[in-house]
Image: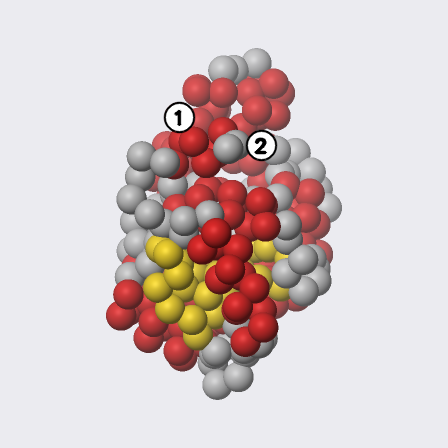
Amino acid sequence: MNAEHRMTTEQPPLRAVIADDQALVRTGFKMILAADGIDVTAEAADGAEAVAAVRRTRPDVVLMDIRMPEMDGIEATRRIVGDAGPDGTRVIILTTYDLDHYVYAALTAGASGFLLKDVTPEHLVYALRLVRTGDALLAPTITRRLIERFAHHEEPQTLAPHRDLSGLTPRELEVLRLLATGLSNAELASRLFLSPTTVKSHVGRILSKLDLRDRVQAVVFAYETGLIAPGGGA
């Protein structure tokens, strides 16, 4: 049993919804999750079904395909996150390609991260448990590349018009800039000569002050406010 699993054994069983228009994909993921004690409360073949399933069963996490009939995963994510509030259901986007241009739109819609469909069973389970705790599934190099590629091509999407950076301290601004380049907490701690606990506290305050759900939204926010420019680095 790995460390991530041990840390979650005291929590209630994780509950998930799987949304994908391919029945074989849903079945495969359900088998993987069930084998690790995760309760799949519902399956959905399109976005509308996913929204209805979430409203009906209130799961912790949704595995959401992007390209589905009737309603795609982006619109479904937007509705689920809008219903959920800051402590509600989280969404992990499933995609076939790591630079699928729809993923950036899904992240701005409120998704907590994304996975490739060829993900290993171990990483799939870890990902669900990670976002269930309120963290974000942020693969630094892939997510940074994704945002840098598409941030300056997409129509502006305002996460919250009233937000600005004036409420952040100089140290918090520095942490946000580095976070936006894809650094993990451990890497931030090393770069800033701080303890991981202190870095985690800074990140938590940044999210709270800017009313952001998680690190993914913080990265998107940093690009969309111009705190860091695509290709610019920190």
Residue closest to the eye, 8 or 192: 8
Relative to 202, residue 157 above or below:
below
Q: Choose top left, top right, bottom left or bottom right for residue 165.
A: top left
Q: Residue shown at 51%/43% (left/top)?
A: 126
Which secondary structure lies at badge 2?
loop
Q: Residue shown at 33%/75% (left/top)?
A: 52
Q: Report whether residue 228 is seen.
A: no
Relative to 51, residue 34 above or below:
above
Q: Colour scheme in the image?
A: secondary structure
Residue closest to the eye, 150 or 232: 150
Three-letter code, disc 1: Ser
| Residues at marks 2 and 1, CA–CA distance in whole angstroms | 14 Å
Image coordinates of residue 227 in percent, x first then y, are 56, 42
Which quadrant is home to the C terminus? top right
Q: Report whether residue 28 is seen.
A: yes
In-image side of 7 versus 196 (left or right): left
Circle 1 crowding by C-alpha within 10 Å: few under 14, some 14–19, many from 20: few
Residue annotated with mark 1: 201
- The numbered disc on residue 184 is 2
Q: Residue shown at 27%/70% (left/top)?
A: 56
Image coordinates of residue 161 in percent, x first then y, are 39, 57
Three-letter code, disc 2: Ser
Residue closest to the eye, 86 or 209: 86
Image coordinates of residue 20 in percent, x first then y, are 53, 72
In-image side of 68 versus 80 (left or right): right
Residue closest to the eye, 177 or 100: 100
Circle 2 crowding by C-alpha within 10 Å: few under 14, some 14–19, many from 20: some
Image coordinates of residue 3 in percent, x first then y, are 49, 29
Which secondary structure lies at badge 1?
helix
Q: Residue shown at 53%/84% (left/top)?
A: 69
Relative to 154, residue 44 above or below:
below
Query: Which of pointers 2 and 1 lies earlier in the amino acid sequence?
Result: 2
